[in-house]
Image (cartoon, rainbow, N blue to C red):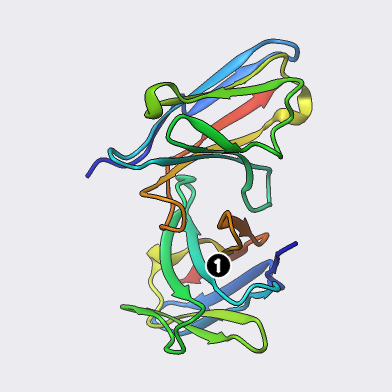
Amino acid sequence: AQTVTQSQPEMSVQEAETVTLSCTYDTSESDYYLFWYKQPPSRQMILVIRQEAYKQQNATENRFSVNFQKAAKSFSLKISDSQLGDAAMYFCAYSGGSNYKLTFGKGTLLTVNP
Amino acid sequence: EAGVVQSPRYKIIEKKQPVAFWCNPISGHNTLYWYLQNLGQGPELLIRYENEEAVDDSQLPKDRFSAERLKGVDSTLKIQPAELGDSAVYLCASSLDLGSPLHFGNGTRLTVT
């Protein structure tokens, strides 16, 4: 079974600084997708970034980028120039196999200090 | 485009009472999901629909939970009877098809007293 591990229950960063959230996963599949979702207090899960496993190039979306290490099964999220609005729970998620079931980690609570 | 709409936002009921949640997915999205999110945890899949068909309901506690997706659009999730341990957030999501990114609603926070 696929598992997703986020080893940092909480992280904090100063406004305008850079922070990296860690995620590792376990799978026997060769083709899959990885995601980072953001969940603010409004509870809505918002897709931050998506990585296809067959692509070696790391995905980037404005201030958000990932470091995808397929051999190490590692998928970290880097947030540059952190803003107060980035404060939220961040979930790493894996989707693969014949049914593309989305499996989430337990999340990392990010605090942004002014 | 309008997002995934869920109602109600909050629901408080006494144990042993029934409760129902409603979800309207993004127009044109064939795949619909119901997730359960316990406090401090990531969401866990309860059931997935492809159009009207429930194709993955292995995690749905069928003794008390039921779901339906009539006409392949809106969906309802029901619990009868509710137990204290059912207190959680129930999230609905939809995607264009299997493998496409999921779009989530705001969820329903259920409190069972």
User: Which residue: 62% across, 58% down?
Assistant: A104
Q: Of residues B77 and A65, which is closer to you in this image?
A: B77
For residue B70, what is the image quadrant?
top left
Horizontal placement of B12 versus A66: left or right? right
Callout 1 environment at 10 Å: few (<14), some (14 to 19), or many (20+)?
many
Q: Chain of mark 1?
A: A
Outermost residue on the left side: it is B1
Q: Amino acid at mark 1?
A: Leu
- Residue B54 in the image, given as x and y percentages of width and height: 56, 33
User: Which residue: 50% across, 67% down?
Assistant: A35
For residue A2, what is the image quadrant?
bottom right
Q: Is residue A45 above or below residue B18?
A: below
Image quarter of the N terminus of chain B = top left
Q: Of residues A6 and A71, which is closer to you in this image?
A: A71
Horizontal placement of B52 versus A9: left or right? left
The tally of labels here is 1
- Residue B88 in the image, given as x and y percentages of width and height: 65, 35
Horizontal placement of B97 versus B2: left or right? right
Residue of label 1: A110
Image quarter of the C terminus of chain B = top right
Q: Is residue B3 above or below residue B98?
A: above
User: Which residue: 63% across, 62% down?
Assistant: A107
Residue A114 appears in view: no
- Residue A74 in the image, given as x and y percentages of width and height: 63, 82
Q: Of residues B16 and A9, which is closer to you in this image?
A: B16
Q: Of residues A15 and B34, which is closer to you in this image?
A: B34
Horizontal placement of A90 versus B59: left or right? left
- Residue A94 in the image, given as x and y percentages of width and height: 59, 65
Q: Is residue B72 above or below residue A5?
A: above
